[in-house]
Amino acid sequence: MMKKPLLFARELVGLTLKEGDTAVDATCGNGHDTLFLAELVGKTGSVLAFDIQQEALKNTKNRLSQAGLAHRVSLIHASHASLSSYISAVPSAIMFNLGYLPGGDHQMKTDTQSTLLALEVSVSAIKKGGVITIMAYTGHPGGEEEYSAVFEYLSALPQQEFSVLSYQPINQRNNPPVLLAVFRI
Ligand SMILES: C[S@@+](CC[C@H](N)C(=O)[O-])C[C@H]1O[C@@H](n2cnc3c(N)ncnc32)[C@H](O)[C@@H]1O
């Protein structure tokens, strides 16, 4: 049975992230990935979670509090483009879920320029053996352009240092999401 791209992203992160590690959710949204990361880093690890919308941070905080894991996560009301100002330990996993907040304002979405800046920082910051996952959506205005720019940037990473994969259903209608994953060798 084929795994949906988001589930496959989590599987890749799950194979990498260990108790005590640091992880980043670059687009916390409603907090599903943040909670997933907070569970994986265990009692001794930590997660940084970014979003530009207060509403997203509130939703994420609620989700974490319900699970009793809010203390493992630093919620940061800032663009992921400023990631380098907040990282104090080398992250083993960084997750991006591009686009807009489900159930929120569709105009408040990731944009090509800040996504590329955040990816550049992520690529230099990620631990050796670590993984960066990017879920990209092409069905909304600007989504195709963002995906193409990310694809082009990641395709040019040196193969001695990084392996990059693309995972996408190719016979599905209505712009299925694409997973891009970067593994630091
Ligand atoms: C598809 S949603 C993320 C969904 C999330 N992974 C979840 O589990 O619910 C994308 C999020 O990225 C946020 N976002 C947009 N631009 C951003 C930026 N420059 N930095 C950080 N977050 C951003 C949006 O506000 C939105 O909440």
Image (tube, rainbow, N blue to C red):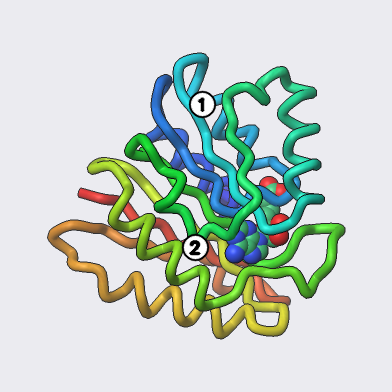
- On the image, the x and y values in percent for residue 28 come to 65, 48
* Mark 1 Cβ inside 8 Å of ligand 1: no
Task: Return the residue at label 1.
Answer: 40
Specify few, some or many for label 2: CA neighbours under 10 Å numbering under 14, 14-19, or 20 or more. Answer: some
Q: Is residue 40 above or below residue 171?
A: above
- On the image, the x and y values in percent for residue 40 come to 51, 26
Q: Is residue 169 above or below residue 184?
A: below
Q: Residue at x 59, y 51 (%)?
A: 6
Q: Amino acid at mark 1?
A: Leu
Q: Is residue 53 above or below residue 40?
A: below
Task: Return the residue at label 2.
Answer: 81
* Left or right position of 71 against 151: right
For residue 120, what is the image quadrant?
Answer: bottom left
* Mark 2 Cβ inside 8 Å of ligand 1: yes
Q: Amino acid at mark 2?
A: Ala
Q: Residue at x 49, y 28 (%)?
A: 46
Determine the secondary structure under disc 2: helix
- Number of the label disc, if any, that sits on residue 170: none
* Left or right position of 3 against 69: left
Residue at mark 2 to residue at mark 1: CA–CA distance: 25 Å
Q: Residue at x 45, y 40 (%)?
A: 13
Q: In what quadrant does ligand 1 lie?
A: bottom right
- On the image, the x and y values in percent for residue 33 come to 62, 42
* Left or right position of 53 against 88: right
